Amino acid sequence: MSSRSFTSSSTRIVRSRFSESWYSFGRTRPTMLELDSHFRNMWRDDLRERETITRRLEGFGQNLPGNKEEEYERAEVTEADLAAKLHVTNLDLNISENTKQHHADMYECTEVRGQKEAELVVRRGQSFLITITFDRPYDIDKNDITLLFSLASDESDSTVEELFKVTEDQDTSYKPRRWGATVVKKGGNSLTVEVFSPASSPVGVWDLIVRTIVDVENGKDLVWQYNHNEDVNIIFNPWCKEDVVYLPDPQWLAEAVENDSGVLYQGTHDNIKGKPWYFGQFEDGILHAALHLVRKGFNFKMTRAMGNASKVARALSRIVNFDDDNGVLHGRWKGGFAGGTSPDAWMGSVKILKKYMSTAKPVMFGQCWVFSGVLVTVCRALGLPCRSVTNFESAHNSDKERLSSDSIYRPNYSGRYVNTSKDSVWNFHVWNEVWMSRPDLGKQFDGWQVIDATPQEASEGTFCCGPAPVEAIKEGLIYIGHDTSFVFAEVNADCVTWEEDPETRKLKQVARIRNSIGKNISTHEPNHESLVGLQRLDLTGQYKHPEGSAKARGVLRQAQAMFRKDNLDEDEDELPASEDIGLSMDNIDTLVGNGFSVKIHARNLSDVVRTVTLTIDILYKTYNGVMTGMVAQSEHTETLQAGQSRSFSLSVTPEQAMMRPKEGFNFQIKAHAKVKDTGNLVIQQYNVQLRRPDLVIKGPSTAKAGETVEVEISFTNPLPALMTNCEVEIDGNMKVVAPFTDNIKIGDISPGQTWSKTIKMSPTFFPRAQRKREASFGLESDQLGDVRGSYGIKLT
């Protein structure tokens, strides 16, 4: 409902925002929290939002299709005029009915929340109803209505405007490509009007103005303008066939748009673990944050490009990191997390986005899964179908010379060879996919598109990535879309070792590892009714052809040639020499608190005797491929008969294994076999991560929304050492009601001790359409790092 107030010192009618709280309504106003700017904006709004008489020049309304306003003479409305002529007394946005029809009633902001009024959220490409009430019956022959929708920003004076006449004969020829409106119901002093925004409309916060011809004076139309004080939030519509984000699969609609909880995948390719994550896209304030980020992504210049899903997705991949524009998240991979929150401690996106909006400063700190989780939330809030994707054994190619992940050994000042390449291989990397058709690229490239907010390499001068069509990645078409070559290398690169000749400075290829990059590419399987769990869907076949196949090799060579501008040496892609020694390693599955043993098997694949020197290195590493120290090393020289195998072992003590918990108990095992007879070098490397136990969460399996239930959290210290500074973080749409905090300080847990606590939780009423509620739990400590747990119930 609209609200107005009369000033006591004048006969003019004024609806001033000074009488309202800026945060009580649709748009989050002073986003940068500068009070002087805030009050200037309020004064500007006050001047704009006066109800005035507009004396229009001849020809009013004749050029409406061009959506261009003409100049008017303006005068204030007197109380006498107001009493004598038809005027708008109320405008009802029919929020309850519209949001239900638009799959938008799951947003918490669509209902009254304390002092906050309900807000209208609708999806483009679909009609919605407004009811206009006048002070007297509306006369079709005498009165005409024109609607003006304006996409504006408090941070700039730029606007996008849509001006159109309300038809009274139910003519809807404006559909599906133009804005329009028609009267669908008349009753007493009210008209119900069906408003249509095309599926290309910019997403954002729209102002609504009603202009009514109330009389004719001296041959000119007399027009009164009513400025409505409730915003209209328009977002993408994946249910609409005319929208480029249309998603026909109902299971993926439920997952990639409506699911507000999920799993982000981490670990190693042979030891995958899920981190529960609360996306919370329907929570109060999150849609406002997402729409603010769209405005910020376009530098607060209102533009029709804000209706282009591809451009919006790319802008969001830039603005979720802070590197160029003081965006949402500050990434950090080394140097500790003093002054912020460890990336492992985050259990969801809502707290991050709310903190960013309240402080207007980047939130510290994030790593790839945090960037991905926040980007899922923002996209889903906007109606842009989005899923989080994890690539195991993910290559980070930092150069513009080749698509391989290179180790380049050059002699330093002391003559010792050191690796000078910035390329790396991450245990895993998490990015996102968004769903859309690509009329700019061709139908072949419709569907899932990769975007990535983790600031790895600059793209066109800023830290963003994508959208890159998954189909183009699979076929090696690296110049289709944005940053496709970078993502292609992440899932397909060979790992190549080069040695620089100290005299000629030329690089010699000494080892090439194929088929080791891009393993078990994973996302959360769409299963709307199931509660939290691993539920992993493997996407590897969508990104690449079968590993080792001729097709896969051909695609790689084609992509390399395109990347190198057809300057690929004929033998560069080939293995440097016949690999006459095969290396393999036994799987390691060890719980933290224990040591482990590495067993490497070397086999002579040739038909002659070989003398082999095998070096085994066990190194500490971070998940993103940075080696931080040596754990253990051994060297063995053996003579192997044709076909003979030998095994070599190297052990790590519990004390060594526990040395660097902040690095996530990640290790890399490198095996180098130097064949004395041929000079060949065979290299294999393996990533290992020790397992951490889970939190144990127990509670009822069903409850009613708003009901209080008891939930028990417990954990047993598996270490031979004291766990210190322990605390549990809780997030999700199961809210903690006792104690009144979602951060539980524990203190210390002794070796072997079981800690437990019973808390009271309550499932939220939103999102209404979903029948499940979930909570994510994370236990942080100095010795063990990230321990997870999850709990879910079904609503009755």
Image: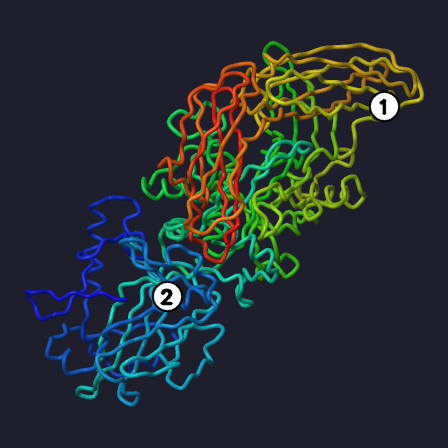
Residue 301 point in image, percent of width and height: 36, 55
How busy is the neighbourhood of tag 1: few (under 14 within 10 Å), some, or many (20 plus)? some
State whether residue 747 is above or below residue 221. Answer: above
Residue shown at 45% from the left, 19% from the top: 748
Determine whether the residue tagged by mark 1 lies in a helix, strand or loop: loop
Does 292 appear above or below 672? below
**Amino acid under disc 1:** Asp
Nearest the camera: 188 or 120?
188
- The residue that appears at 44% across and 27% down in the rendered structure is 727
Q: In which quarter of the image is residue 306?
A: bottom left
Along the viewing direction, whichever of 503 and 348 lies nearer the viewer: 348
Residue 457: in sight, yes or no? no
Q: Where is residue 401 in the image (x, y as percent from the top left)?
A: 63, 35
Say which residue label 1 marks.
580
Closest to the camera, between mark 2 and mark 1, is 2
Please tell me the numbered disc located at residue 95: 2
In which image quadrant can residue 426 be found? top right
